[in-house]
Image: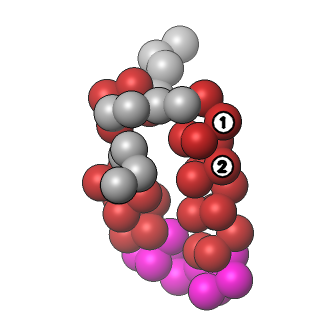
Amino acid sequence: MMAGTGYLEAIRQQIRVRHYSYQTEKSYLYWNRYFIRHFRFSTAKQISPRVC
């Protein structure tokens, strides 16, 4: 199972709330999965946004 599954569901929910197109949703989720795999995140806590 991919790390950050709840993270991806949160992204999906936000995309749908904002009424983005289905193709945009697919693209955003694809790039987020790629990002997670590339940096080998193992938990959603590692993906949390950085506070500036």
Relative to 21, 5 lies left or right: left
- The colour mode here is secondary structure
Q: Which segment is the magenta one?
A: 14-24
Q: Label 1: few (<14), some or many (≥20) within 10 Å?
A: few
**Quick one: which residue is furthest to the front in this view?**
1
Instruction: Report the amino acid beneath label 2.
Output: Tyr
Relative to 29, 48 lies left or right: left
Question: Separation of disc 1 and disc 2 at Cα?
Answer: 6 Å
Q: Which residue lies under the disc numbered 1?
A: 38
Percent position (x, y) of residue 27?
A: 69, 69
Relative to 36, 34 lies left or right: right
Is 7 within the magenta?
Answer: no
Q: Which residue lies under the disc numbered 2?
A: 34
Do the numbered discs 1 and 2 sit on residues whose CB atoms are within 8 Å? yes
Magenta stretch: dominant secondary structure? helix
Q: How many marks?
A: 2
Which residue is located at x 60 percent, y 29 percent?
A: 39
